[in-house]
Image: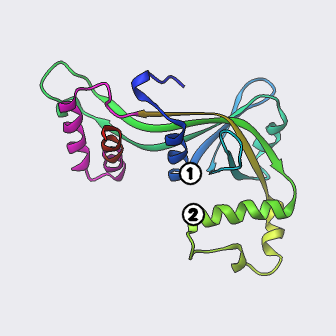
Amino acid sequence: MYIPKHFEASEETGREIMQAHGWALLVSTDENGAPFCTHLALAWQDDGTPHGSLIGHLARANPHWKLFANAAQSMALFWGPHAYVSPTWYAPGAKVPTWNYVTVHAYGRPEVIDDTDQVLAVLTDLAKIYEGKEGWTLDALPPGNAAAQTRGIVAFRMTLTKVEAKTKLSQNRDMEDRTRVIAKLEASEGDDAKATAEWMKKVLS
C-alpha cells in the first residue's frame, strides 16, 4: 500500500482499526496469479506471534479456501471511517477535494482449521466479539446442531506476517484547515463523517 510518511500509522493503531472494524475483504491469488476476493468478518487475536493472527470462516461452497494451500500470501483489507472533504471547508485558496480515511492491509497465509472443536472455538470467539457478553451464543442451538452446521463452512486462521496501517486525515494541511474540516465533519449527519472527525482529533492529540 502506498503510504506517504505523514499518513503512516503504527501497527498498534492497525490492531485498533482491525478490532473496531472487523468487516474485511480477503484477497488471495489463484494458480494463474488472478485475485479471488471474499467479503467476510475477521477477528484479530493476540496469539503470541509478532503480529498476531486473524480468524474467520467461509462458506464451504466458496472455492476461495482451496487457494489457501498456495504459497502466495493473502491480504485482508479493513476499512475504518472515511469521508469526503470539500475544498470549500478550507481557508480561502487554490485547493482541491480529497477523501479522508482509515485503513489497514494485513498479510499472511490462511490455514484451514479441520478439527471440529477448534472450528467451534472460532465461532464462539466471533460470537463473543459481535454479540457482546450477554448476547447470543452457540449454546442457544439444539445439542449437536452447532457441530453439524460446521460441515457447511471452512474455518481458518491467518498468522500475520505484516500489518500496514494508514490514517489519511489531513495531516498534510495546516492547523486552520484541519480544524475547519473537523468542524464540518462533526456537523455532518453521517456516522462515517463523525467518526472520521474523531480520528482526526485523535491524530491531532
Label 1 crowd bin: few (<14), some (14–19), many (20+), radius 10 Å: many
Picture disc at residue 130 = 2
In this view, 98 is above or below 149: above
Residue shown at 22% from the left, 26% from the top = 174
Region in magenta: 168-197
Element carrying mark 2: helix
Residue closer to the observer: 94 or 11: 11
Number of labelled discs? Answer: 2
- First in sequence, mark 2 or 1: give its number: 1
Numbered disc 1: secondary structure? loop
Q: Are marks 2 and 1 in contact (CB under 8 Å)?
A: yes
Instruction: Give the Cα separation between the discs numbered 2 and 1.
Output: 9 Å
Farthest-out residue, top: 94
Amino acid type, mark 2:
Tyr
Residue 49, quarter of the rendered image: top right
Q: Which residue is found at the position 83% from the left and 69% from the top?
A: 148
> Which quarter of the figure has residue 203?
top left
User: Where is residue 28 drawn, in percent x and y?
Assistant: 71, 34
